[in-house]
Image (spheres, helix red, strand yellow):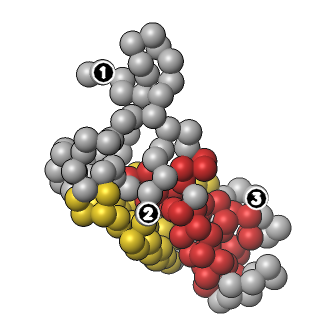
Amino acid sequence: MDFTHFDAQGNARMVDVSDKAITARTAVAEGTIAVSEEVFRAVEGKTVKKGDVLTVAQVAGILGCKRTSDLIPMCHLLNLTNATLTFELLPDSFEIRAICTVRTEGKTGVEMEALTGVSVALLTIYDMCKAIDKRMVLKEIHLLEKHGGKSGDFFFEGEKT
């Protein structure tokens, strides 16, 4: 397999997508943050002093999707047509699961945007709750599925590595 972000001389480069067809593209990513029971209850009850954690994290995650090309050097600037971020509270494990779905009509996929959205949302939860407990752990951030483009559909299956 060739490394497409390097030229023949080993110099970094952005992949040229000029000749690729414009297609509908979607990516879904997820990740979790493990928190203490105290943090979980504060988020769930909306009693964190900095405000409504999940609403702020939702907005931050969507903003992260939109700013991915500013953060990841070889990402193309994309015109996103939709970005959503939802959360699932997991009381049995004191975890919060973030799910980000991103869509575009373009020449390159939106996997990095979905992954960035999840990451920024989870980091925002950490930031807003660190005064309560700094032992939170971000984990299992990964692509769940993607649709569109030359490589076709992808669905995450099996063990996470």
Residue in front for this viewpoint, 152 or 125: 152
Within 10 Å of disc 1 (Cα), the crowding (few <14, some 14-19, many 20+) is few
Q: Residue at position x 54%, y 70% from top?
A: 62
Q: Which of 51 and 79 is in front in this view?
A: 79
Report how far apart the C-alphas of labels 2 and 1 lie in the structure. Answer: 27 Å
Q: Which of marks 2 and 1 is in front?
A: 2
Q: Is residue 74 above or below residue 48?
A: above
Disc on the earlier residue, 2 or 3: 2
Q: Mark 3 or mark 1, which is nearer the start of the sequence?
A: 1
Where does residue 42 sit, x and y in percent of width and height?
A: 69, 81
134 on left or right of 139: right
Give the residue at x 22% y 50%.
Answer: 21
Give 145 or 40, whichever is nearer the viewer: 145
Q: Position of residue 145 (x, y in %)?
A: 28, 58
Are circles 1 and 3 on residues that touch, CB within 8 Å? no
How packed mark 3 is, by other alpha carbons closer than 10 Å (few <14, some 14-19, many 20 or more), is few
* Secondary element type, mark 2: loop
Q: Residue at the spot x=46%, y=47% of the render?
A: 76
**Residue 134 numbered mark, or none:** 3
Q: Disc 2 or 1, which lies upstream in sequence? A: 1
- Residue under numbered circle 1: 2
Residue 42 sits above or below residue 105 on the image: below
Mark pair 2, 3: CA separation = 36 Å
Judged from the image, the secondary structure of the residue bearing numbered disc 3 is loop
- Looking at the image, residue 115 sits to the left or right of residue 60; the answer is left
Q: Quadrant of residue 57?
A: bottom right
Which amino acid type corresponds to the residue marked 1 in the rendered image? Asp
For label 2, the residue is 79
